[in-house]
Amino acid sequence: MNVWILLFGLLSPLFAADSSAPNAPMNTDGFGFGYQAVLAAHNAAQETGDSEDKFFRSFDSLAGVSLYSSEEELTARKGQPLSIVPDPWQDSLEYRYADMSAGVSDGVVVYVHVSPQQARDYGLRLNGIGIDPVHDTLQETLGSPDFVAEDGDVYMRGSTALKIYRSQKTGEWDGIDLFDEYSS
């Protein structure tokens, strides 16, 4: 929304119906708008209450754990895991905590997983911001899925992916993973 307001503010002098517009002073770049138009568009966005941007432009962390953090950073942040088990799908170890699990390969976090029960018990934070896959409007926070699979929706930000797994029987969310597209 802010982008549209900014764009309108920047382009509106070009479409002015005022006959004095051709005589309006020009900025040094040759256009009849500049800092004032940008400031006006910014103020208009704040007045409409759209100044809080809910859209995630990147996926950096899930449940307080950053993708690509080291094993030492993981244990410093979360403490000692409840258990460490081999991951059956990848050549990695899964560090299991009460609120999440993290796949560690070659000493680096390659994925983070949160189950619905963990999210209910401890909350769910993406990039430090609380989200609720059940009640949130994911279109506002994540946009449209980049891929729709049988088992869930995949959202991409660069090479980082967020997958919201859905039960094939009920359609309800069944887990969420943060991972690098190359590690899946």
Image (spheres, rainbow, N blue to C red):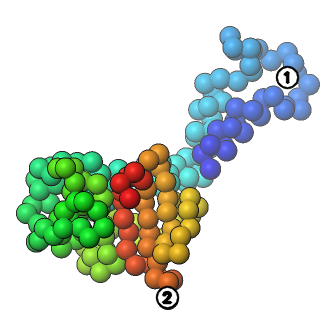
Amino acid at the residue labelled 2: Thr
- Name the residue located 58 percent from the left edge and 40 percent from the top edge: 43
In the foreground, 17 or 86: 86
Q: Tag 2's secondary structure?
A: loop
- Name the residue located 68 percent from the left edge and 10 percent from the top edge: 28
Q: Nearer the viewer, mark 1 or mark 2?
A: 2
In the foreground, 70 or 55: 70
Residue 163, quarter of picture: bottom left
Q: Are marks 1 and 2 in contact (CB under 8 Å)?
A: no
Q: Is residue 184 visible?
A: yes
Amino acid at the residue labelled 1: Ala
- Name the residue located 49 percent from the left edge and 88 percent from the top edge: 170
First of labels 1, 2 by sequence position: 1
Residue 147, quarter of picture: bottom right
Give left or right: position of 28 versus 71.
right
Q: Residue furthest bottom?
A: 169
Q: Which residue is disc 1 drawn over?
A: 21
